[in-house]
Image (tube, rainbow, N blue to C red):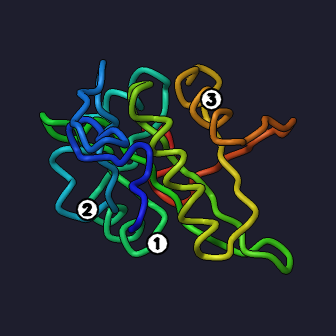
Amino acid sequence: MRRRAANVYSGHGRLSAAGRHVREVGHLAPRVRPVTADDLAALAPLDGEYAARLGLEPCVTLGSLHYFGRSGHSFVAEGDDGALGFALAHSTWWGGDPVLRLERLVAPAEAAGALAAAVVKSAYDAGVYRLVAELPPGDAVGRAALESAGFAPRETVSYARRLGSAGRAA
């Protein structure tokens, strides 16, 4: 006879070794799933608030969700009332190694850690072992989530330039 695992997740709590249902105290972890273009209406307002608060440009568009959705490394965290946050990441090459770049992590603390962990797992599963994330200095929630997922800060200076008519002041 096989022995039952000590704690088996049941969706709304856990089963004890004796098979009895035990209710979890507190909040359930958010559901994390791959991002799709159908998420535009839910994610654009979250991105807009995040960008406005931190002085960034919003990045969630139909085109960006199509792009990041194909990456296999971008996720949405959902609660009972819908989208809580998202992580947009993709792999690229640096030298001779693939690198996963986390471009945006927008979520409250209870979902940010789950999203960061999903990005790390997707990278590992794809054989991408170098991960890089850039966050604005004021994103304390994002920094805490990344550090809890094993990321470490490094000293860099980031420059940006926008070309063409979009780069000219009005």
The residues bearing labels 1 and 2 have C-alpha atoms spaced at a distance of: 15 Å
Quadrant in the picture for residue 124 = bottom right
Badge 1 is on which residue?
Answer: 71
Of circles 3 and 2, the one toward us is 3
At horizontal 34% and vertical 62% (from top left) the residue drawn is 34
At horizontal 38% and vertical 41% (from top left) the residue drawn is 58
Badge 2 is on which residue?
Answer: 62
Placement of 90 over or under 55, stated as above or below: below
The residues bearing labels 3 and 1 have C-alpha atoms spaced at a distance of: 23 Å
In the image: residue 64, left or right of residue 128: left
The reply to whether callout 1 and callout 2 are in contact (CB within 8 Å) is no
Q: Report helix, strand or loop for mark 3.
A: helix
Query: In terms of sequence position, does the residue under pointer 1 or pointer 2 come before the other?
Result: 2
Dot label at residue 15: none
Coordinates of residue 138 in the picture (x, y in percent) = 58, 20
Badge 3 is on which residue?
Answer: 143
Query: In terms of sequence position, does the residue under pointer 3 or pointer 1 come before the other?
Result: 1
Coordinates of residue 26 in the picture (x, y in percent) = 30, 19
Q: Amino acid at mark 2?
A: Leu
At horizontal 85% and vertical 80% (from top left) the residue drawn is 96
Q: Could you classify mark 1 by the number of other residues whose Cα lies within 10 Å: few (under 14), some (14-19), or many (20 or more)?
A: some
Of 72 and 21, the residue lying toward us: 21
Q: Report helix, strand or loop for mark 1.
A: helix
Placement of 133 over or under 144, stated as above or below: below
Q: Amino acid at mark 3?
A: Arg
The residues bearing labels 3 and 2 have C-alpha atoms spaced at a distance of: 27 Å
Quadrant of the snapshot with the N terminus: bottom left
